[in-house]
Image (cartoon, rainbow, N blue to C red):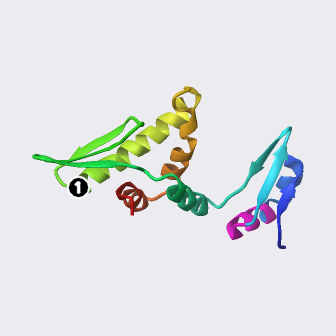
Amino acid sequence: MSGTVHYPTLRAGREHLTDVLDAAAEGRPASVSRDKRTYATVDADRLAAYLRLVRPARAEVLAENDGWSVFIPGLPIAADGATLDEALDETVLALRDYADAWSERLHRVPNHVDNWGLVQVVEFSSDDQLKVWLRGE
């Protein structure tokens, strides 16, 4: 099968789930509608790579006397470490904690609701991918 894959009902989407997932894996538009909403299906690795590209971390890294600090302006994310690598490891943990909190409760809080893209980046990226993203590489 080639081209766009769209199923106008949830039932049709379930019946053709393999086609939906195959299209998503190939990067083709794939969607299913339910009630009045349409839901896109995207390969998670492809989504995370794209979001890391279009949503840079903009992390600020500071060398201090006793080590390193990393923080992300505009987000409640900050961490310290004796080495830069330790600070980045701690920042990844802080990002994962934030993503968990966002999924549990912050997704309804007005000043956090638009961070869904960040949560997708965190959930669908490895620790190493997040560290590269934090460094702006």
130 vs 102, left or right, is left
**Magenta segment boundaries in residue numbering:** 19-27
Secondary structure of residue under mark 1: helix
* Residue 72: image location, x then y, percent: 37, 43
Q: Position of residue 46 (x, y in %)?
A: 60, 63
Measuring from the top left, give residue 80's x and y in whole percent.
Answer: 23, 44
Q: Position of residue 36 (x, y in %)?
A: 85, 38
Q: Residue at x 52, y 45 (%)?
A: 119
Q: Is residue 21 magenta?
A: yes
* Circle 1 residues within 10 Å: few <14, some 14–19, many ≥20: some
Q: Is residue 100 above or below residue 57?
A: above
Give, as a three-letter code, the residue at label 1: Leu
**In the image, residue 22 above or below residue 57:** below
Quadrant for the C terminus, please.
Answer: bottom left
Q: Is residue 35 left or right of residue 99?
A: right
Residue plotted at (48% across, 39% down): 100
Q: How many marks?
A: 1
Q: Where does label 1 land, which residue?
A: 84
Seen from this angle, which residue lies furthest bottom?
A: 1
User: Magenta span has 104?
Assistant: no
Image quarter (top left, top right, bottom left or bottom right) of the N terminus: bottom right
